[in-house]
Each structure stands twice: as C-alpha cells, then as structure tokens.
Amino acid sequence: MIFLLLSILFSSITVSFFKVFELKKVDTFQAIIVNYFTCSIIGSFFADNLLWSKAVWNSEWIYFAILLGLLFIGIFYCIALTAQKISVSASMVAAKLSVVVPVLMAWLLYNETLNTPKIIGISISLIAVYFISNKKDGGSTKLAHLWFLPVLVFLGSGSIDSLLNYLEEHFIPPFSADDIVTAAFFFAFVAGMILLFVLNLKLNRRAILWGFLLGIPNYFSMYFLVKTLGAFPASYIFPINNIGIVALSTLIALLAFKEHLNKQNIFGLSLAIIAILLISFS
C-alpha cells in the first residue's frame, strides 16, 4: 500500500511542477524534453536490459515503444498547458477519466461487454470533463477557447492507457514493464530533440535544471504504480490511484497556488469521482 501512496504523491507533485514553471518563466516544452532524458536514465538502472542492447532493439515491441514515446511527450505537454492555462485539477481530471478510452477500445476490439454502470460512468465522465474545465467566473469567457486542451488530454491519455494495456497483454512478460517504459521515455526525449533541431532552438540552462527535477517524480510516479499493480489487482488499484491523484493535486493547487474552484468545478470533481468508481468497479 505504501507504493500506491507514493505513486499518488509523485503524480501530484509532477503536475504541480507545471504551475511552478509558469511562475518561474521556465520553457515548459524544453523542460519536458529534459525530463524524459532523466526518466530514461533512471529507468536504465531498473530495467532488465540496457537501452542499447540487441534484446531491446530487436524486440517486436520496439515500434510500439516509439509510438508510446511520441504520445508521452505530446500528451504531457497538453497536460502542462491545461494545468497552466485552466487549472491543475482540470488537467488531472481529464487525464484520470481517460480510463473511459481503454474501456471503449476493449468493447470495440475485443468484444468485451459494456454493462449499465459502465455506460452511466462513461456518460458522467464526459459531463465531468466539461464542468471541471469551465472557468467562467463573473461572466468572463476568456478561457472558453481552451476547451480543446482537456479534451486532448482525455483522448491522448486514454490512447496511452490503451497502448500500455496492449503491450502488457502481448509483451509483458517476457520483457519487463521497466524495459518497455524506459525505451518509450528515451524515444520521447529523441522526438523532442528532433523537434528542437527542426525549429533551430537550443536548450537553455533553466529548462535543463527544472527538466531534470521534473523527471524524478515523473519516473517514480509510474515506477511505484507498476510495483503496486504487481501486488494488487488493477481493478482495485486504479480507482484509488486515480481518485487519490485528482484529490491531492487539487488540494495542492488550492493551498500552494491559490487556484479557485467555482461551483461548476466542484460539481465536475464530484462527478469525476463517481464516474471513476462506476467504470472501475462495474
């Protein structure tokens, strides 16, 4: 259980970094690139096979790891923008409600049944994303045009979960989750560096420092989650993990960054918790 609590803590710390970046004027995308380099280095100490080993590069899952890396960096940046432009709670609710996507994929691809509680949970989750993202206070619609950010986080995080589920189904074992995730972290870093080269940009020192710091909680949030899944059923862990992250990250945002939740946001948070419970336990 201590691993689960550590996963919740590190996940909440990770998303809180993005508000710090905003306050410290850190280039978020550059920091995210460095973060994935940090993750891949730390992961190399835990993986069974080194990144440059033949076992990794000749594996059948290597192309899936490349795709996963591209999704990692793209969606992580969307999470950062959502946290900065809308709220930390909006970014986490959208990310954690993405459990809907693999449920729908399992229904479409593997003919798994959708019972009534799951259908109700999916419907509630869509409503929850709307309300938690609604920042209209005092009639202001200044943030209305940013509605697509939590939607991208919702769909993108769900795609990552679906791909991870596929990899777990087909490739873990014989390879460990640490091997595959570390490779994905590395490809996320490579994709970011290629984009910087194409845009003719250079990493600045501030982004390097903060990106290194971000990579530590980001890696261990996933590491401890994987360790927890090895000891408890996923159906038991994911609801507690998702609700815990939503609750703790929202609390940190309220206390540390003085974020304001209007009545619609609070209603959306409540719906999100109900949706997670319905989808996970049905």
Image (tube, rainbow, N blue to C red):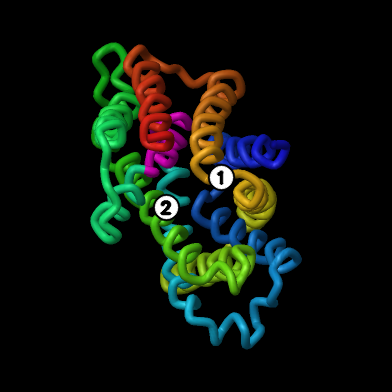
The x and y percentages for residue 142 are 28, 27
Q: In the image, what residue occupies the spot 56% across and 24% down?
A: 257
Disc number at residue 75?
2
User: Label 1 is placed on what type of residue?
Assistant: Pro
Q: Which residues are magenta?
A: 82-99
Left or right: residue 148 versus residue 241 is: left
Rendering quarter of residue 273 = top left
Residue closest to the eye, 159 or 143: 159
Q: Residue at x 58, y 62 (%)?
A: 203
Q: Which residue is mark 1?
A: 233
- Pick the residue in front: 102 or 236: 236
Whether 189 is drawn above or below 215: the answer is: below
Examine the rendered structure and indicate whether residue 64 appears above or below residue 60. above
Secondary structure beneath dot 1 equals: loop
- The percent coordinates of residue 155 (x first, y second) are 32, 49
Is-magenta flag for residue 87? yes
Nearer-N-terminus badge (1/2) = 2
Percent of width and height locating residue 100:
33, 43
Which type of secondary structure does the marked residue at label 2 adopt?
helix
Expressed as whole percent of the image width and height from the top left, the position of residue 225 reads: 61, 47
The answer to whether residue 51 is seen in the rendering is yes
The majority secondary structure of the magenta stretch comes to: helix
